[in-house]
Amino acid sequence: MPKYIFVTGGVVSSLGKGIAASSIGKLLEAKGLRITLQKCDPYLNVDPGTMNPYQHGEVYVTHDGAETDLDLGHYERFTHAVIGKENNITAGKIYYTVIEKERRGAFLGGTIQVVPHITNQIKQYLKAVTKGKRIDVVICEIGGTVGDIESLPFLEAIRQFRHDVGRHNAINIHLTLVPYIRAAEELKTKPTQHSVGKLREIGIQPDILLCRTEKPLNKKVREKIALFCNVEEECVVQAPDVRDIYEVPLVFKEQKLDQIIVDLLRLKCHQEDLKEWEEKVVKRALNPSKTTQIAVVGKYIELQDAYKSIYEALRHGGIENDTRVEIKKVDAVDIEEKGPEGFLRGIKGILVPGGFGDRGILGKIKAIQYVRENRIPFFGICLGMQCAVIEFARNVCGFKEAHSTEFNKKTPYPVISLLEEQKRIKKMGGTMRLGSYPCVVKKGTLTHKVYKKEEVVERHRHRYEFNNKYVEAMEKNGLIISGQTPTGNLVEVIELQDHPWFIGCQFHPEFQSKPDACHPLFRDFIRASLEAI
């Protein structure tokens, strides 16, 4: 059976459990182990697909069409793990499954309780993530913070799970905070002690502590944490603030975290280093020779996590081009109210990402008109591509009231309209065009030059599409359809004649970009920005 590593968090949220879990996965892969990662979220939504980005951040889409937590993006960026529907479970999904079983009479009239029915269902999902796969280690991240009511069923389930499989088949890693009190000039261990104490009340004794800190932990502090938290001193691992998240595996490697885990789980593996990761990713990220500035014109700009994969993919493009990418976040509503010139002057490239709802749409359209007329490299993704089509229809083709039926059902020129299969759908959750679909790339186009392939597979998340009734009119005015579905019924990629670099795609290429394997569209977009006048 595979070994399990459970990663929990304490003291405060946003300590970086996802980055820590991903970094551990990177370390174990370097030792030749086959790994997968799983996220357990305590909220009662069945998945995050219907949640506002301000509530949850980005919705990450897997190859098999699951709408998941954004930490699964970190898992795929750091490791070679193939992430799918079974890699993200929520409390809502667990309760929904158990209640459905009860309605079918699966429990033979018994009383349904959190223990054992909910916890048993959680354990089933923990095992299901490896079904049909050759996996050596499962790294399971428990969302939320120890002490939250919502995460108690998950914590009880992993407590039971370790009891079921034995202490050498499952370990607990706890991520905690060791704050530095500037006035006293001291690191304080009490929050960590309280967090571990709370875990132990539940019946979980952590084997390893990852201590987030802005100051190095000296020997005295480590000894104190080890003593009061009942762990070995070598298992008190510091997780300091770093300049770049891709440094974290190197920091853990330096403290021999990988070997500690291997010893605790009694794993047999070979010794490998992270030289390629250090040379190809970290050094390039920290010491680039060039700089470019990219504007991201969106509607959820205030929240960093709303466009997490977009920002990371832009950074990957910078790493690939030995370039520091300075991202200027521009609120589309501000452009709508004040015009684009003051926000976009001097920018070397502009990306308009996806989104839902009509707020800020006019600002995005004005931004796209500005880059088209000023010949600035442009990259539109999902709604960004649709806004580019609307702008072109209005300002080049002369369809002044052109719009998407998402925002104006009575528009005389519905250049963007609802997908045919979406017209019968009433429920909102998990019903969009989701997951990986093939796209045929037209030879001789900029898109073909970027991909160097005639067919690619990309991930989707949308309900609306380019209306094929307007293809001929737009092509006559210089719009190029450079990517379509194999049947030709859906437009996937558009570009412009006589423009240095202007591409809009209906899919989400950011979900397939990695720091050591940048997606070609982001790689070439950053390259084009370096050549911009």
Image (spheres, rainbow, N blue to C red):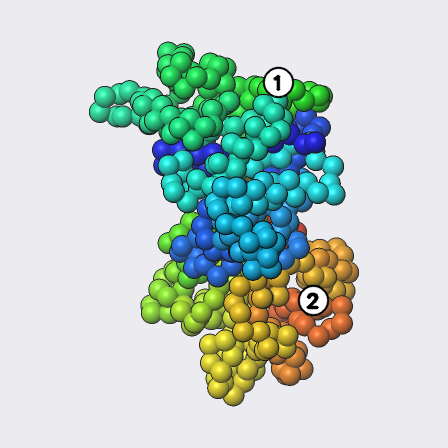
Q: Quadrant of residue 198?
A: top left
Q: Is residue 226 above or below residue 325?
A: above
Q: Residue furthest front?
A: 109
Please state the horizontal and vertical placement of residue 486, each as a whole percent of the image. Answer: 76, 68
Q: Which residue appears at 46% of the width and 76% of the height? A: 407
Q: Secondary structure at mark 2?
A: strand
Kind of residue sitting beneath label 2? Gly
Q: Residues within 10 Å of mark 1 (few under 14, many from 20)?
A: few
Q: In front: 367, or 358?
A: 358
Q: Which residue appears at 66% of the width and 28% of the height? A: 30
Please state the horizontal and vertical placement of residue 76, each as a whole percent of the image. Answer: 61, 43
Q: Are marks 1 and 2 in contact (CB under 8 Å)?
A: no
- Reading the image, the residue beneath label 1 is 263
Q: In front: 411, or 14?
A: 14
Kind of residue sitting beneath label 1? Asp
- Reading the image, the residue beneath label 2 is 483
Q: Which is in the foreground here, disc 1 or disc 2?
A: 1
How many discs mark residues in the rendered view? 2
Q: Secondary structure at mark 1?
A: helix
Q: Quadrant of the N terminus?
A: top right
Please state the horizontal and vertical placement of residue 418, each as a whole percent of the image. Answer: 57, 76
User: Can you see residue 313?
Assistant: no
Q: Residue furthest left?
A: 183
Q: Is residue 281 above or below residue 97?
A: above
